[in-house]
Amino acid sequence: MSTDDLLARHRAVMPDWMPIYYQEPVEIVSGSGRRVTDATGRTYLDFFGGVLTNMLGYDIPEIREAVQRQLATGVVHTSTLYLIRNQVELAERIVAVSGIADARVFFTNSGTEANEAALLAATNYRRSHQILAVRNSYHGRSYATMGITGHRSWSASALNPLQVSWLHSGERLRGLLARLGPDEQLDAAEEDLREILATQTAGDVACLIAEPIQGVGGFVHGPDGLLGTWKKVLDESGILLISDEVQTGWGRTGEHFWGYQAHGVVPDLLTFAKGIGNGFALAGVVGRADVLNCVPAISFSTFGGNPVSTAAGVAVLDYLRDHDLQANAARTGALLHTGLDEAAARHPIVGEVRGKGLMLAIEIVRPGTSEPDPAATAAVFEACRAGGLLVGKGGLYGNVLRMGPPLTLTDDEAREGLAILVDAIASVSASVSATVEGVTA
Ligand code: PMP
């Protein structure tokens, strides 16, 4: 069965709004380490890991064996009405690494539900449905999480159970805070927050929810300390801070285990998903006991934290620690970052290289401007695939290439992927300058 047939069948039964990558879509049929093979037998180095979700890579024996041990018991599901040993063990470990004192964990199946649960706790704790969110954010696809998503392409409905006010993001290329130095940006962010509280809110505000590095938004992030600057103002009136660590958690940023740690702050609630299950559906919220415990009705998630996904989660956390993958992310990420910076200096279609650790993005613009160039972005994206590298796309204007490889990436693989990326940038850059010269001639 060729991929063409599968594409036609996909289109016949799936909704049109579910995007699929590449002019000729890829069907991944097997994987090992950081490499995947498609239905035609072509192998790719994977720098996107199923959207930062295959955090350790493919076919990792330790994870496979942990899941097989659970399957061998015959129990895939019991429900949280019964004690689940794997769930308790995973919660203990997450509490221990969360940095939040006397924390509780509630497991869900997705990042969306994790953020819903965090919002449920925060709104009940503060008895307020007023929320502060950040422009260019992405938090999920339910009504409440779409309502705090500051990204029109992903906002499929304006129906919103929350009252939301919007802070400026750390965008440095365009917008009101563009090109400010880090200190000026922190001052401007504080002023922005104070003004919003004074002009757009009434009485108690429940919380601010923020991604330390905006994932879907194209890995845009403010200066270190930004969450701390906001928290100082929030603390004056007891407003809670939720750190959405769905993409930034578990050491991916290299310098820290959580994205929030770059900001001199501890959040009241932290949401996680994606990488913790290395592909198994596992997500949740960890936070202050008094905040999470305040939900005033019975609530549970049928599949959240089930015995199989939590078996995977425990094995993933052990693997991260045993192989010091945070340090690996810092080293291989620095290698990639330096190489991309060098390419950016040679090719003016690269407007900015940004990110931390193994969460890196390049923004493609019209040379000499900050104007987004989605067509050139798509060309680089396709050229990477032709060269044997899978990367992601994103950003408010669809002009950002995102790299979030498995944290097990080796130095050689980092160099190999970098070479493919740089070649792709160079070839598209050459054709863009040829077109510009053609127009001006
Ligand atoms: N928060 C962030 C920061 C995300 O990147 C995502 C997914 N891209 C979500 C929440 C939603 O997670 P899910 O798709 O698992 O519902």
Image (cartoon, rainbow, N blue to C red):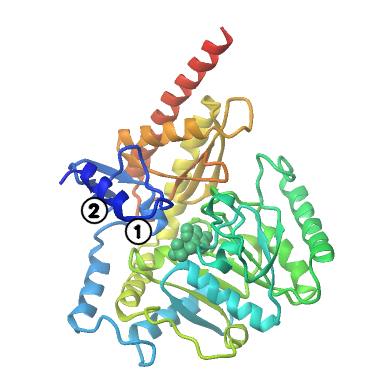
| Left or right: 90 as drawn, with respect to 150 | left
**Mark 2 residue crowding within 10 angstroms, few (<14) / some (14–19) / many (20+):** some
Residue at the spot 33% in from the left edge and 40% down from the top edge: 389
In the displayed image of the protein, which residue is found farthest to the front? 12
> Where is residue 53 drawn, in percent x and y?
39, 59
> Where is residue 268 drawn, in percent x and y?
62, 75
| Dot 1 amino acid type | Asn
Q: Which residue is mark 2?
A: 31
> Where is residue 333 drawn, in percent x and y?
45, 47
Instruction: Check if mark 1's residue and mark 2's residue have beta carbons within 8 Å.
Output: yes
Residue at the spot 40% in from the left edge and 63% down from the top edge: 275
Q: Is mark 1 within 8 Å of ligand 1?
A: no
In the displayed image of the protein, which residue is found farthest to the top? 441
Instruction: Please state which of residues 78 and 9 is positioned toward the viewer in this rendering.
Output: 9
Element type at marker 1?
loop
- Reply above or below: 224 against 122: above
Q: Which residue is mark 1?
A: 54
Query: Which quadrant of the view contains residue 100?
Result: bottom right
**What distance separates the C-alpha of mark 1 from that of mark 2?**
11 Å
| Left or right: 19 as drawn, with respect to 312 | right
Which of the marked residues, 1 or 2, is nearer the chain's N terminus?
A: 2
